[in-house]
Amino acid sequence: MRGKLGFHPYLALIVAAAQFVIGKGASWGQRYTRAPLDPYAYGLLLVGPVAIVLHRRFPLLTTIAALAACDLFLIGGYPYGPSFVSLAVLLFQLVLHGRRLIGWSMAGATVVSFIGYGWAIGQRDLFHSVWIFTAVTLLMVVAELVRTVRERRAERERIAEEEARRQASEERLTMAQELHDVLAHNISLIHVQASTALHLIDTNPEQARTALATIKTASKEVLGEMRSVLNVLREGAPRSPTAGLDRLDELIERSGMRVSIERVGCRPLPPQVERAAYRIVQESLTNAARHAPGSEVSVRLEYGLRELAIQVNDTGAATVPVLSESGSGNGIPGMRERASALGGTLVAGPAGAGFQVQARLPLPEESQ
């Protein structure tokens, strides 16, 4: 707003200088037909620049004042030209600032005023009247075109800003989902291993030591993954999390469970599919560790032409689930949301004595 308000004094100075320069030239060029400039004429030429300074606050009054000063300048017999500049600028500004009714009304008053002056001094030919009407109309049409261009540019900028805000909101949602998955998996793993260590610390110290080592690894991993996810929010950082299917072996090793993995085919996948597939497998292992400790888990990835099929099965709990009543209950809905966001499907439910998760993620044509 400061820039817009501060522009008017500079514009007024430019217009004042232009009117004085044009006035000097016009006075010399019309020295035999029009009166020379005097202090009264210079005073009239200053009315327009002062009106430009006050125009934003008093649009109608300042335009009327500029038109009146222009008429008095012409009636005084002074040269044609310099007094038109301020009035043209004010009419242009009226349209640009959205005061189109006032602008066109004052343009009509200007046409009537100038034609009336011409008739008063004997210039009553049709060509003169048409020329005045055409000149003023052309000025207003150009102002309308400029206003339209500015409004369209502002609309494009507004749409771009809304799109940027939407993308930022989607990225924040993705970050929240990533943090949920990272924390849910690793904290559940830590909880399971801690419970195992406490249970075996007296009877089987070696196995308890193994569980504690897994806790150490998992806690380090959760800090690393959280740092990776949060780095996405930093300026200049990658705009997508780094989790992918190339880290499945590392994920399985950290889980401390008996997991077998089968891959049918192999092909490059879009980053969003890689990330969703990794998180689905991760959440499935988390659920198995929470609800079916001691079970055997199988992971199958089938790379098709049009979709990636994921299947995770566990054989059911071999020991009492230590976390069967724990958790937020968002695991399966979160996996389903990930699949749906890509246009895929996810089905999860009991399968024999265990549990099964099946997901199908479509692959876009450009990844084929």
Image (spheres, rainbow, N blue to C red):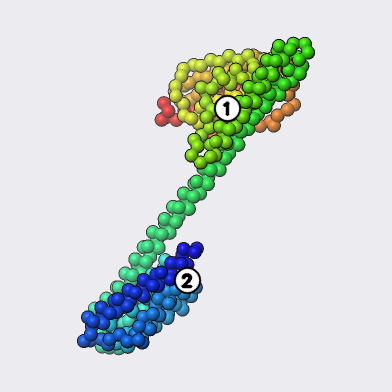
User: Which quadrant, please, contains the C terminus?
Assistant: top left
Can residue 96 be seen here?
A: yes
Which residue is located at x 66 percent, y 22 percent? 216
Q: Nearer the viewer, residue 352 or 193?
A: 193
Please give the residue where the numbered disc 1 appears in the rendered image: 279
Q: Quadrant of residue 110?
A: bottom left
Can residue 104 be seen here?
A: no
Residue 126, above or below 158: below
Describe residue 105's horizontal placement relative to residue 299 as left or right.
left
Which residue is located at x 44 percent, y 56 percent? 154
Question: How many numbered markers are drawn?
Answer: 2
Describe residue 4's horizontal placement relative to residue 203 as left or right.
left
What's the distance in space between the residues labelled 1 and 2, CA to CA? Answer: 58 Å
Q: Position of residue 313 (x, y in %)?
A: 61, 18
Residue 65, above or below 300: below
Instruction: Please report contact status of discs 1 and 2: CB closer than 8 Å, yes or no.
Output: no
Q: Secondary structure at mark 2?
A: loop
Describe residue 223's horizontal placement relative to residue 124 as left or right.
right
Q: Position of residue 89 (x, y in %)?
A: 37, 72
Q: Nearer the viewer, residue 176 or 54?
A: 54
Q: Nearer the viewer, residue 312 or 16?
A: 16
The amino acid type, in three-letter code, at marker 1 is Arg
Q: Nearer the viewer, mark 1 or mark 2?
A: 2
Q: Residues within 10 Å of mark 1 (few under 14, many from 20)?
A: many
Q: Quadrant of residue 250?
A: top right
Q: Secondary structure at mark 1?
A: helix
The amino acid type, in three-letter code, at marker 2 is Arg
Q: Nearer the viewer, residue 29 or 311?
A: 29
Please give the residue where the numbered disc 2 appears in the rendered image: 56
Q: Position of residue 178 (x, y in %)?
A: 59, 33
